[in-house]
Image (tube, rainbow, N blue to C red):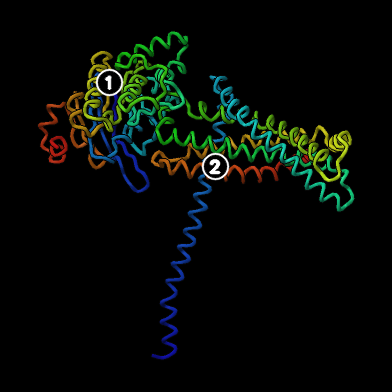
Amino acid sequence: MIHIENLWKCFGDKEVLRGLNLHIPRGETSIVIGRSGCGKSVLLKLVTGLMKPDGGEIRIDGEEISNLKDLNRIRRKIGMLFQSAALFDSMTVEENVGFMLSQHSSLSKREIEGIVAEKLHLVDLDGVQRLKPAELSGGMRKRVGLARAIAYNPEVILYDEPTTGLDPITGSEINRLIQDLHAKLKVTSVVVTHDMDSAFSVGTRMAMIHAGQVIASGSLAEIQKIDNPILQQFISE
Amino acid sequence: MTPKGNVEKQSLSTQPYCRSTLVRFADYVGGWIFKKLFEIGNAVTFICSTLSLIFRRPFQFNLLVRQLLLVGVNSLPVVLISGIFTGMVLATQGYHQLKDLSAEGSVGRFVSVSVVKELGPMVTAFILAGRIGASITAELGTMKVTEQIDALDVMATSPVKYLVVPRFLACAIMLPLLTTFSIVFGIVGGYFTAVYILPVKMNGRFFLEQARADIYINSVVVSLIKSSTFGMAIASVGCYKGFAISSAGGAEGVGKATTGSAVTSLISILILDFVLNHVLDTIW
């Protein structure tokens, strides 16, 4: 589904990604782990076209996206849950969740309301349509962000640190939601995290970034067997 | 040690110091110029991108109407108050200046020409730069820092089309309208002062005749063109400064950008006023 080859990204003199290679298979939930500042979130921004790579290729469904003119066509296949949820302050929950539908479909207001209610139900948040993001708790904001990410029925969902900043119980609920959505929607998911509980509970595959490169990747069982001290230290901590 | 030896030693020790200071100074100045040119290039690209997206579908009139209300209707009270007091101050000052020349009868003319040609557009633009320009920067800057602008991009919606175009059009449309109100109320303020407050009360009809004497349609058109251009400048600066905040800038970045936006808008208005006065005077 997503092929990344020899990806380079620098900020000034700092080389964040140094020839990174990664394959995200269709229908799997791939976890990307690594220390803070290793370039996990940068990787998501490169995949969504928010940043341009300095070198290398990113192919989504066989299409190279780095120099693609109509990037929005690819973006319509992607849903993203941001670390801070990134809900639009000025809009209600309903307007947030239905944003892509109102922008890119010819559905009527009533049809959009129906889809929004359905997606909010999927994330266990019924009846909050009229609330503003400021009236929601951290966990609720993430759920609304998740409902917004799946509103347009994406083929790929990207999760940027989905449990960061949440208490353990709310974090577990978000993990359960990610598992439920994967089971119900059969989408390809990429979860960037350094929360190992979250990683092992939602993932089917895992890759670790260190020093700008993927130093280990494979299924969860394979990862645990790889004899790499950095990886083993990271997953055992 | 001989005196000659002393001199040689001194020149050897100070020469590298002088050179490195010069190099550092040139490096600093060059870096500053390069940075400013880069910023200007980015701003020009941003404005061109905004202009090109104005005529591209989809046209979201609901967003434009919302901005028209925010920029226009909500600014009306402050513009009216400032317009009235501008006219009152002009009448008072004009009366005292003209009295020395025994021309106090021309207060109406003095007020209307000043308000229509210069102070109406300028005062309105200054107020909008502080009220709307800074608010645009703060709003868009906060959206940038909280990844809301990234979210728009990821949801296949152009942030420039969605956020900048309605604000740009609203400022370009509403500034001339607000300026018209400011001019009318400036003349009303001048009338009120001249007829009821000044030591020598002026006849109301005479004031209005004087006020109309030097005002031609060209002056009004020039004034409205100027104010529309000021509106475009305020929106462009406000939006650009908001978008230019780094995601890691945080609240401090938003605060700095907001201040920078107000200052840049005010300077841009003054420069544009000078340029437009020359250009439009040449045309008409």
x and y, in percent, of residue B123 in the image? 68, 40
Q: Going 83% across and 36% down the picture, which residue do you hit?
A: B215
Figure quadrant of residue A174: top left
Q: Relative to A172, say whether A16 is above or below.
A: below
The quarter in which the C terminus of chain B is drawn is top right
The quarter in which the N terminus of chain B is drawn is bottom left
Q: Going 32% across and 25% down the picture, which residue do you hit?
A: A142
x and y, in percent, of residue A23 in the image? 25, 28
Q: Going 43% across and 27% down the picture, which residue do you hit?
A: A89
Seen from the viewer's position, the closer of residues B132 and B86 is B86
Seen from the viewer's position, the closer of residues B167 and A51 is B167
Residue behind mark 2: B261
Rate crowding at label 1 as few (under 14), some (14 to 19) or many (20 or more) other CA atoms within 10 Å. many
Q: Nearer the viewer, mark 2 or mark 1?
A: 2
Seen from the viewer's position, the closer of residues B128 and A19 is B128
Q: Amino acid at mark 2?
A: Ser
Residue behind mark 1: A188
Q: Disc 2 is attached to a residue of which chain?
A: B
x and y, in percent, of residue B241 in the image? 51, 40
Q: Residue furthest bottom?
A: B2
Q: Secondary structure at mark 1?
A: strand
Figure quadrant of residue B282: top right
Q: Amino acid at mark 1?
A: Thr
Seen from the viewer's position, the closer of residues A74 and B107 is B107
In 3D space, how far apart are the residues under numbered discs 2 and 1 (Cα atoms)? 43 Å
Left/right of residue A228 with respect to residue B43 in the rendered view: left
x and y, in percent, of residue A63 in the image? 36, 24
Tell me the tag on residue B46.
Answer: none
Residue B49: in sight, yes or no? yes
Left/right of residue B214 with respect to residue A94 in the rendered view: right
